[in-house]
């Protein structure tokens, strides 16, 4: 069933017109999540998670679609998507580095690792490098505090890291 989206003039000025979402497998995954959660408004975060996992990131079209399906104002959906740092409104880079900024990792120099990654690859935490090869994200504790500071590069945990080791490891992955 296709929902008709009738955005207000103010919403259109802010977000642009909502194009129709593509009809593909990813769309079916999202629709299944909407159905499973009964189109409940309090399932917004879970639905956005599913949308991001399926599509890689949250496009404006997806935000419109979810807002329409859950009968929520687009500004509310946009607000939630931008509030939590685990949601991304930009395409991810070819490789992903997730830096733990939990307390233990922070005390063991996570911040310096973030700075070194930014200098080396031009991507501060939360950003993607200009060439689209590396995205740096942050997390709050992977539950591996004994290995602090911890980062995860393309799903591989790299513990007891240092700024130089982290940069070298990412260069290896990019090579
Ligand atoms: S604080 Fe970083 S893994 Fe726990």
Image (cartoon, grey):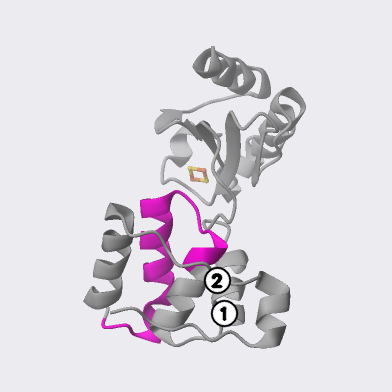
Q: Nearer the viewer, residue 22 or 46?
A: 22
- Disc 2 is placed on an element classified as loop
Residue placed under numbered mark 1 in the picture: 74
Q: Is residue 16 above or below residue 164?
A: below
Q: Is residue 134 above or below residue 42?
A: above
| Mark 1 surroundings within 10 Å by alpha-carbon count, few (fewer than 14), some (14 through 19), many (20 or more) | many
Q: Position of residue 97 (x, y in %)?
A: 54, 34
Q: Position of residue 27 (x, y in %)?
A: 33, 60
Q: Which residues are magenta?
A: 38-62
Marks 1/2 in contact by CB < 8 Å: the verdict is yes
Residue placed under numbered mark 2 in the picture: 18
Image quarter of residue 120:
top right
Q: Residue furthest right?
A: 119
* SS assignment for the magenta stretch, majority: helix
Q: Nearer the viewer, residue 59 or 149?
A: 59
Is residue 78 magenta-colored? no
- The image quadrant where one finds the C terminus is top right
Q: Nearer the viewer, mark 1 or mark 2?
A: 2
Residue 162 shows in the view: yes
Q: Position of residue 158 (x, y in %)?
A: 47, 27
Mark 2 Cβ inside 8 Å of ligand 1: no
**Left or right, residue 76 beside residue 68:** right
- Disc 1 is placed on an element classified as helix
């Amino acid at each position: 069933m296709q929902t008709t989206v009738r955005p207000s003039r103010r919403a259109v000025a802010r977000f642009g017109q909502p194009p129709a979402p593509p009809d593909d497998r990813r769309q079916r995954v999202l629709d299944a999540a909407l159905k499973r959660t009964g189109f409940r408004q309090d399932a917004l975060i879970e639905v956005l998670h599913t949308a991001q996992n399926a599509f890689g990131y949250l496009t404006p079209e997806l935000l419109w679609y979810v807002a329409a399906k859950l009968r929520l104002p687009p500004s509310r959906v946009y607000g939630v998507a931008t509030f939590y740092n685990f949601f991304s409104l930009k395409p991810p880079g070819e490789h992903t580095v997730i830096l733990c900024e939990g307390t233990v990792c922070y005390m063991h120099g996570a911040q310096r690792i973030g700075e070194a990654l930014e200098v080396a690859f031009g991507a501060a935490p939360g950003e993607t490098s200009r060439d689209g090869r590396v995205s740096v994200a942050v997390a709050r504790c992977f539950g591996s505090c004994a290995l602090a500071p911890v980062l995860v590069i393309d799903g591989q945990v790299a513990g007891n890291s240092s700024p130089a080791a982290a940069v070298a490891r990412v260069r290896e992955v990019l090579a």
